């Protein structure tokens, strides 16, 4: 961003919003919005409590498990749909339905299937993340240059070698993009799942803070979640940037 001929970092926009937040909070215009400085102080205190640390461990365990399952299922399914038209015709409609459906409405069904516990949270993360991984992997595989596949076959590459050394590497930029978007959606899934279950992890903390009008702690926990999602997405994006040359090799 450029202002009056000077290049301004994108993070500067956050400072403007935080300053506006502080002003609104200081004037007590909205009771649910305390000053930003108070939220930061609450965040520092919050991360030192055993309750937050226990909730973080529970949340991270469910998130990592659900994301691992989504990646392990989503990538092979995307490759299958990208390489075989029959699979794409059979599964494409369902993948598109679930990727665009309001998945929050399905979480109560998961509670019936898996109970009020961590399994429901894992399933929620999986459902939120897997479909975008499938779609992006499918798109990457479908854009692999036929000349690369033909070359591998001419050199006698076996089917496993064709997929592991040609197709997967050529589709890697889109696969990483799908994982990055899936991670962001997975954070949404873990929060929504815990909010509806409301007895484990961050969901229990959100429920406690909102019920007792502890808005500084509520917003502090929200900021921590946002920061986690942004950091994870940025790390994946950096990995994407390092493999962009594979996309050029497919043209």
Image: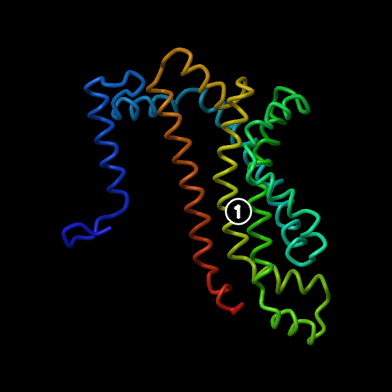
Q: Quadrant of residue 143?
A: bottom right
In the drawing, does residue 153 fall left or right of residue 224? right
Residue 95, image x, y percentages = 71, 50
Residue at 78% over, 53% down: 91
Name the residue beneath numbered marker 1.
179
Q: Residue at x 64, y 67 (%)?
A: 171
**Residue 87 x/y as whole percent:** 81, 59
Corner quadrant of residue 111: top right
Secondary structure at numbered mark 1: helix
10 Å crowding of disc 1: few (<14), some (14-19), many (20+): many
Residues 61 and 243: in front is 243
Q: Nearer the viewer, residue 201 or 136?
A: 136
Q: Residue furthest bottom?
A: 154
Name above or below for residue 41 compared with residue 94: above
Q: Residue drawn 58% across and 73% down? A: 246
Looking at the image, residue 206 lies above or below residue 238: above
Seen in the picture, residue 239 relative to 248 is either above or below; the reply is: above
Along the horizontal axis of the image, is 208 left or right of 40?
Answer: right
Image position, residue 191 (x, y; %): 56, 32
């Amino acid at each position: 961003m450029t202002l009056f001929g000077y290049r301004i970092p994108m993070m500067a926009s956050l400072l403007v919003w935080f300053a506006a937040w502080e002003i609104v909070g200081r004037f007590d215009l909205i009771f649910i919005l305390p000053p930003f400085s108070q939220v930061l102080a609450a965040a520092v205190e919050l991360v030192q409590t055993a309750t937050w640390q226990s909730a973080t461990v529970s949340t991270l365990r469910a998130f990592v498990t659900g994301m691992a399952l989504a990646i392990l299922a989503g990538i092979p399914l995307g490759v299958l749909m990208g390489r075989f038209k029959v699979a794409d015709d059979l599964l494409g409609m369902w993948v598109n339905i679930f990727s665009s459906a309001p998945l929050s409405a399905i979480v109560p069904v998961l509670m019936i299937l898996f109970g009020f516990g961590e399994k429901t949270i894992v399933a929620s993360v999986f459902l939120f993340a897997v479909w975008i991984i499938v779609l992006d992997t499918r798109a990457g595989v479908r854009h692999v240059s036929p000349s690369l596949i033909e070359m591998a076959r001419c050199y006698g590459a076996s089917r496993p070698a064709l997929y592991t050394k040609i197709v997967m590497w050529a589709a890697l930029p889109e696969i990483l993009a799908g994982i990055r978007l899936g991670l962001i959606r997975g954070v949404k899934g873990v929060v929504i799942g815990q909010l509806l279950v409301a007895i484990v992890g961050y969901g229990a903390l959100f429920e406690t803070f909102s019920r007792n009008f502890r808005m500084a702690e509520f917003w502090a926990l929200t900021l921590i979640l946002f920061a986690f999602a942004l950091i994870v997405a940025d790390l994946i994006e950096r990995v994407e940037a390092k493999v962009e040359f594979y996309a050029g090799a497919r043209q």
